């Protein structure tokens, strides 16, 4: 066979900036068949007819179109067909774009959370308004003697089949208003997961309204919390405030972020109202 106008696979690879393995894969799936295959050496050779096909493949791959869709178009070339494929791909790209924006929001929330955790003064009681939030709630009385004591209850929270939403700094522990009023602060009544607006969670959730809270952040984790509850309760009594909800205790920085326990930060918020 006259190979004057044929190009070996290595040269085609360089001309089209496509790896040899990709060209072989295209052949394997029936997307692009070489013009000639040497029976002696097995070398693949391509002609200008394959160049046209390769141009189409490269263009559609640049649009992130799946190979199966490209193959379908190549076997059924038509103006309406390519228009249909392009519209389908446009929809897929827009969907992917929305997902990337959602992921960007999740990253921004974590960055803001970490920066805030390192900027608010420690061991200082303040009166703040917590914004409305969505949570996953589990009634689970427990006593925390170490970080591993939370692992089994956390698994109960992580029941969404959509995505992993249990993330550093989003799991909280709560003490009921009744127990807080009785100064019982050495055990917890519940564990909950705070969901960001963009989190996908298929299980049951609760929306908490914005609420006035007394807040205190301290260096340490849940084990050191009881003494700080006492400080908050003293402040509530002194300021003649009334406890109106369960506490929200969250380790903002812990072993999941740093191995240095001297950098751990925990926040306790107790919902209150003026008497």
Image (cartoon, rainbow, N blue to C red):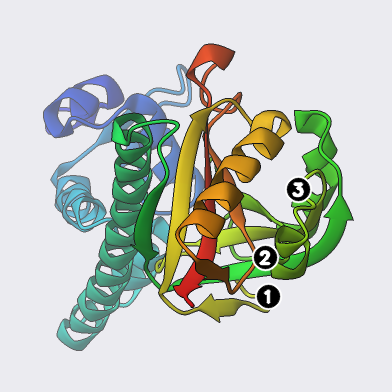
Q: Quadrant of the N terminus?
A: top left
Give the alpha-carbon distance from disc 1 to disc 3, as whole Å. Answer: 29 Å
User: Mark 2 packing: few (<14 Cα in 10 Å), some, or many (20+)?
Assistant: some
Across and down, in percent, residue 220 comes to 58, 25
Which residue, given by chain and number where applicable, does mark 3 sit on? 185
Identify the secondary structure beneath mark 1: loop
Depth order, front residue of 66/48:
66
Depth order, front residue of 169/33:
169
Give the alpha-carbon distance from disc 1 to disc 2, as whole Å. Answer: 6 Å
Residue 120 seen in render: yes
Give the alpha-carbon distance from disc 2 to disc 3, as whole Å. Answer: 31 Å
Of the two numbered discs 1 and 3 on the same chain, state the one appearing first in sequence: 3
Of the two numbered discs 1 and 2 on the same chain, state the one appearing first in sequence: 2
> Could you tell me which residue is drawn at 41 percent across and 26 percent down?
38
Which residue, given by chain and number where applicable, does mark 1 sit on? 203
Q: Is residue 205 above or below residue 257?
A: below
Q: Quadrant of residue 120?
A: top left
Identify the secondary structure beneath mark 2: loop
**Nearer to us: label 1 or label 3:** 3
Depth order, front residue of 34/128:
128
Of the two numbered discs 2 and 3 on the same chain, state the one appearing first in sequence: 2
> Could you tell me which residue is drawn at 47 percent across and 74 percent down?
273
Across and down, in percent, residue 14 comes to 17, 23
Across and down, in percent, residue 196 comes to 44, 62
Q: Is residue 73 left or right of residue 176?
A: left
Q: Are marks 1 and 2 in contact (CB under 8 Å)?
A: yes
Residue 141's mark?
none
User: Mark 3 packing: few (<14 Cα in 10 Å), some, or many (20+)?
Assistant: some
Which residue, given by chain and number where applicable, does mark 2 sit on? 160
């Amino acid at each position: 066979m006259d190979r004057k106008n044929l190009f070996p696979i290595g040269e085609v690879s360089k001309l089209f900036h496509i790896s040899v393995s990709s060209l072989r894969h295209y052949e394997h799936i029936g997307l692009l068949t070489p013009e000639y295959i040497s029976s002696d050496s097995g070398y693949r050779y391509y002609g200008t007819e394959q160049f046209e096909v390769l141009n189409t493949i490269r263009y559609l791959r640049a649009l992130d179109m799946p190979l199966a869709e490209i193959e379908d178009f190549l076997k059924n070339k038509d103006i309406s067909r390519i228009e249909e494929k392009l519209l389908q791909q446009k929809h897929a790209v827009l969907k992917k774009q929305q997902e990337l924006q959602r992921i960007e929001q999740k990253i921004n929330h974590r960055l803001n959370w970490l920066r805030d955790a390192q900027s608010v003064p420690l061991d200082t009681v303040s009166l703040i308004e917590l914004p409305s939030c969505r949570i996953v709630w589990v009634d689970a009385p427990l006593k925390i003697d170490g970080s591993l004591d939370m692992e089994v209850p956390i698994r109960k929270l992580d029941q969404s089949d959509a995505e992993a939403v249990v993330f550093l700094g989003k799991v909280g522990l709560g003490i009921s208003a009744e127990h807080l009023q009785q100064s019982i602060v050495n055990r917890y009544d519940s564990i909950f997961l705070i969901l960001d607006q963009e989190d996908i969670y298929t299980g049951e959730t609760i929306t908490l309204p914005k609420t006035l809270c007394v807040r205190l952040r301290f260096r340490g984790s849940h084990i050191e919390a009881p003494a700080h509850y006492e400080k908050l309760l003293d402040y509530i009594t002194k300021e003649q405030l009334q406890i109106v909800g369960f506490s929200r205790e969250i380790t903002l920085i812990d072993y999941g972020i740093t191995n240095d326990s001297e950098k751990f930060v925990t926040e306790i918020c107790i919902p209150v109202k003026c008497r």
